[in-house]
Amino acid sequence: MRQKVHKLKLGIESGDRLEPVAARLYIITKAEPDPETQAWFGDWWGEARKVAEGEGLELLPVHYMSPDNFDVELYDRIIEIQSPL
Protein backbone atom coordinates (compact mmCIF):
# COMPACT_ATOMS: atom_id res chain seq x y z
CA MET A 1 0.00 0.00 0.00
CA ARG A 2 2.80 2.42 0.82
CA GLN A 3 3.77 2.83 -2.84
CA LYS A 4 0.17 3.58 -3.83
CA VAL A 5 -0.72 6.08 -1.10
CA HIS A 6 0.82 9.54 -0.99
CA LYS A 7 -0.76 10.73 2.28
CA LEU A 8 -3.53 10.02 4.72
CA LYS A 9 -5.55 12.96 5.97
CA LEU A 10 -8.42 13.27 8.41
CA GLY A 11 -11.47 15.43 7.96
CA ILE A 12 -13.58 16.44 10.93
CA GLU A 13 -16.97 16.44 9.24
CA SER A 14 -18.98 17.36 12.34
CA GLY A 15 -17.83 18.80 15.65
CA ASP A 16 -14.29 20.09 16.03
CA ARG A 17 -10.76 18.76 16.61
CA LEU A 18 -11.23 18.55 20.37
CA GLU A 19 -14.71 17.02 20.24
CA PRO A 20 -15.28 15.39 16.84
CA VAL A 21 -18.71 13.93 16.17
CA ALA A 22 -18.06 12.58 12.68
CA ALA A 23 -14.79 12.11 10.81
CA ARG A 24 -13.60 10.75 7.49
CA LEU A 25 -10.28 9.32 6.33
CA TYR A 26 -9.08 10.90 3.10
CA ILE A 27 -6.69 8.73 1.13
CA ILE A 28 -4.48 10.79 -1.15
CA THR A 29 -3.27 8.49 -3.91
CA LYS A 30 -0.69 8.92 -6.64
CA ALA A 31 -3.11 7.52 -9.24
CA GLU A 32 -6.69 6.31 -9.34
CA PRO A 33 -7.01 3.71 -6.56
CA ASP A 34 -6.96 0.15 -7.83
CA PRO A 35 -9.33 -2.58 -6.56
CA GLU A 36 -6.67 -3.92 -4.14
CA THR A 37 -6.27 -0.50 -2.50
CA GLN A 38 -10.03 -0.02 -2.29
CA ALA A 39 -10.50 -3.47 -0.76
CA TRP A 40 -7.75 -2.89 1.82
CA PHE A 41 -9.18 0.42 2.98
CA GLY A 42 -12.72 -0.95 2.77
CA ASP A 43 -11.75 -3.73 5.20
CA TRP A 44 -10.00 -1.20 7.44
CA TRP A 45 -13.08 1.06 7.48
CA GLY A 46 -15.37 -1.86 8.30
CA GLU A 47 -13.39 -2.59 11.45
CA ALA A 48 -12.43 0.97 12.41
CA ARG A 49 -15.98 2.30 12.28
CA LYS A 50 -17.07 -0.25 14.90
CA VAL A 51 -14.29 0.92 17.23
CA ALA A 52 -15.13 4.57 16.54
CA GLU A 53 -18.83 3.92 17.22
CA GLY A 54 -17.93 2.49 20.61
CA GLU A 55 -16.20 5.79 21.38
CA GLY A 56 -19.13 7.91 20.22
CA LEU A 57 -17.58 8.91 16.87
CA GLU A 58 -19.19 8.33 13.51
CA LEU A 59 -16.52 7.27 11.05
CA LEU A 60 -17.80 8.08 7.58
CA PRO A 61 -16.75 6.03 4.54
CA VAL A 62 -13.26 6.74 3.22
CA HIS A 63 -12.78 9.19 0.39
CA TYR A 64 -10.09 8.93 -2.27
CA MET A 65 -8.38 11.96 -3.73
CA SER A 66 -6.15 11.38 -6.73
CA PRO A 67 -4.67 13.63 -9.42
CA ASP A 68 -7.87 13.10 -11.43
CA ASN A 69 -10.20 14.37 -8.69
CA PHE A 70 -8.03 16.61 -6.53
CA ASP A 71 -9.76 19.36 -4.52
CA VAL A 72 -7.14 21.89 -3.40
CA GLU A 73 -9.41 23.72 -0.94
CA LEU A 74 -10.51 20.47 0.71
CA TYR A 75 -6.91 19.25 0.84
CA ASP A 76 -5.90 22.40 2.72
CA ARG A 77 -8.74 21.99 5.26
CA ILE A 78 -8.12 18.38 6.24
CA ILE A 79 -5.54 17.27 8.79
CA GLU A 80 -2.44 15.30 7.78
CA ILE A 81 -1.88 12.16 9.83
CA GLN A 82 1.11 9.90 9.99
CA SER A 83 0.63 6.81 7.88
CA PRO A 84 0.78 3.51 9.73
CA LEU A 85 1.66 1.83 6.42
Image (spheres, helix red, strand yellow):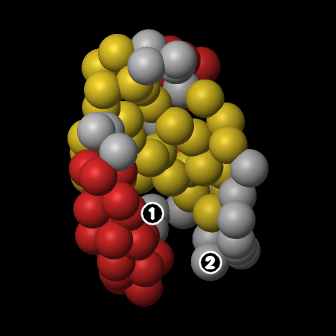
Q: What residue type is labelled 1?
A: Glu
Label 2 or label 1, whichever lies nearer to me, is: 2
Quadrant including the C terminus: bottom right
| Residue 34, position as x, y percentages in the image | 42, 77
Q: Is residue 8 visible?
A: yes
Badge 2, how many Cα within 10 Å: few under 14, some, many 20+? few
Q: Is residue 2 above or below residue 60?
A: below
Q: Which mark is residue 78?
A: none
Q: What residue type is labelled 2?
A: Met
- 41 left or right of 3? left
Residue at position x 66%, y 50% from top?
Answer: 7
| Residue 73, position as x, y percentages in the image | 50, 16
For label 2, the SS is loop
Q: Earlier in the sequence, mark 2 or mark 1?
A: 2
Q: Is residue 15 above or below residue 20?
A: above
Quadrant including the N terminus: bottom right
Q: Which residue is more in the foreground, 52 or 73?
A: 52
| Residue 66, position as x, y percentages in the image | 50, 50
Badge 1, how many Cα within 10 Å: few under 14, some, many 20+? some
For label 1, the SS is loop
Residue at position x 63%, y 63% from top?
Answer: 5
Residue at position x 35%, y 59% from top?
Answer: 51
CB atoms at circles 2 and 1 under 8 Å apart?
Answer: no
* Residue of label 1: 32
Q: How many labels does the image show?
A: 2
Q: In this view, does 19 lie above or below 26?
A: above
* Residue of label 2: 1
Give residue 72's quadrant in the image: top right
Q: Is residue 34 visible?
A: no
- 79 left or right of 73? right
The CA distance from mark 2 to mark 1 is 13 Å
